[in-house]
Image: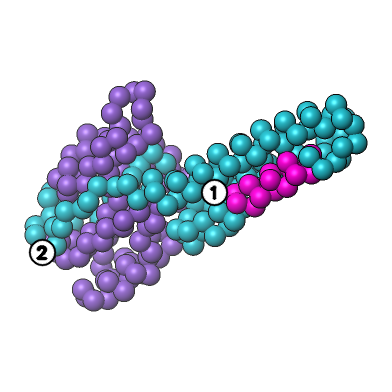
Amino acid sequence: MQSRLADIRATGTEVLAVSVDPPEKNAELAAKIGVEYPLLADPTLQAVDAFHLRHQNGGPGGTMGPDDISRPATYLIGPEGQVLWEDFTDNYRIRIRPQRVLDVLQRFR
Amino acid sequence: MLNLVRRNHWIWLGPLVAFVGAVSYFLVFVRFPVLRDFPWLNLPLVLLGAVLSFAGVWVAWKRPRDVHWRRIKLAVAALGLVFSLGLANLFVWYIFDYSYRIPDPVSLAGQQAPDFALTDPAGETVQLSDFRGKKVLLVFYRGHW
């Protein structure tokens, strides 16, 4: 999303990312790949569970016990907090492209 | 020593290509969406490695310059082939099977998005409800970058 962030923000939309990684790791990653939107930490899977996205043992954890992560998902939340649009990939390697997001944002102007 | 390695390049070339093909997908090419979504570069490389490994066994079999060395070369080439085939198998399984094994999603379209309070990289708490009045593109990533 970083590559088209300016275009996304121009539509009055903010970008928030969530993963189970801790804040320090997110800070490191944000600096490394130059992400300008917040990478939010959800190590207890609070948000992940609220959105029904828990992927049990989906992570490489193994020896440290169960390693639950999030299933990938993208939502467009409206100004009143309602879910306007959602997108779920069926393969975790394949992520939604920014252009598709911009097309969706056009629809919901 | 270097000459020995170069003259027998058929024995190690296949496994090397297979290894580079598989590993470079995860280390390098996942950063490019087109090559990540489908391994246009890496899958052919891995398969090429497997094919070259077959060639390596064939060359070791067909070049009986020194009977003693031939058996050793054949054994090494065969090991290389097993390695390449194993790697190719793992890679194909990962691309076409494993990465599809994610839980079915639950549709929330039209519903009120659940609120949450999470920590940003600076240590500040961010709530989804902080953004009322604006649209939010909320992206959930797998994590473990």
- Residue B79 left/right relative to A77: right
Q: Colour of chain A?
A: purple
- Residue B55 left/right relative to B43: right
Question: Would residue A9 be counted in the magenta stretch?
Answer: no
> What segment is highlighted magenta in the picture?
B46-60
Q: Colour of chain B?
A: cyan
Task: Determine crowd level at label 1: few under 14, some 14-19, many 20+ residues with C-alpha closer than 10 A.
Answer: some
What residue is rendered at 59% in x and 56% in y? B44
Task: Report helix, strand or loop for mark 1.
Answer: helix
Chain letter of the residue carrying label 1:
B
Q: Which residue is mark 1?
A: B25
Counting residues from the N terminus, which is met first, the one under dot 2 or under dot 1? 1
Residue A106 drawn above or below residue B107:
below
Are the residues under marks 2 and 1 on the same chain?
yes
The answer to whether the residue labelled 2 contacts the one labelled 1, judged by CB atoms less than 8 Å apart, is: no
What residue is rendered at 68% in x and 44% in y? B53
